[in-house]
Amino acid sequence: MPIDRRQLEDWLSRAMTPVEPSARFIRRLRGGLVTYRGSGLLLEWKIIAAVVTLILLTAASLGLTLRILLGLLGLFGIIQRSRRRRSTSPTA
C-alpha cells in the first residue's frame, strides 16, 4: 500500500529534526572554502612537470633500446667474423 504525500511529509517532519553543526565542522568547512593567492598555478606546474618527465623517460628508454640493439649487432658481427675466419683458415 503506497503512502500518500501528506503522510510522507508528516513522517519526514518528525524524523528529520534540524541539527546545529559543531564549531569544528564549521571551521573545517570555512577552511576548505578559502583559496590562497597563486594556488591556481600549482596545477599548471604539475602538468608541465608530468610532460617533461614523460619526455625524459621516453628519451631514456629510446637510448637504452638503441644501446641494446647496437650491442646485439656488435655481438652478431663478432660471431660472423669468427665464422669467416674458421671457413677461410687453411686446414692442415
Image (cartoon, helix red, strand yellow):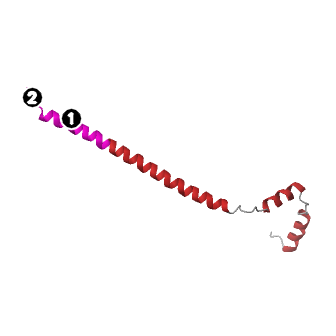
As drawn, the residue found furthest toward the top would be 92
Q: Which residues are magenta?
A: 72-92
Q: Assign the C terminus to one quadrant of the image.
A: top left
Q: Quadrant of residue 75?
A: top left
Mark 2 crowdedness (10 Å alpha carbons): few <14, some 14-19, many ≥20: few
Question: Residue 89: where, in percent of width, then height?
Answer: 12, 32
Question: Residue 2: where, in percent of width, then height?
Answer: 80, 70
Q: Is 62 placed left or right of 14 in the picture?
A: left
Q: Quadrant of residue 16?
A: bottom right
Q: Assign the N terminus to one quadrant of the image.
A: bottom right
Question: Residue 71: where, in percent of width, then height?
Answer: 33, 41
Between residue 56 and residue 87, name the one nearer to us.
56
Q: Which residue is mark 2?
A: 91
Of helix, strand and loop, which one carries label 1? helix
Q: Is residue 86 magenta?
A: yes
Q: Is 14 placed left or right of 84 in the picture?
A: right
Vertical arrangement, residue 80 with respect to residue 38, above or below: above
Q: Which mark is residue 82?
A: 1
Between residue 43 and residue 12, name the one nearer to us.
43
Tell me the amino acid under the disc marked 1: Ser
Tell me the amino acid under the disc marked 2: Thr
Mark 1 crowdedness (10 Å alpha carbons): few <14, some 14-19, many ≥20: few
Q: Is residue 20 magenta?
A: no
Question: Residue 49: where, in percent of width, then height?
Answer: 58, 56
Of helix, strand and loop, which one carries label 2? loop
Q: Is 77 placed left or right of 60 in the picture?
A: left
As drawn, the residue found furthest toward the front would be 38
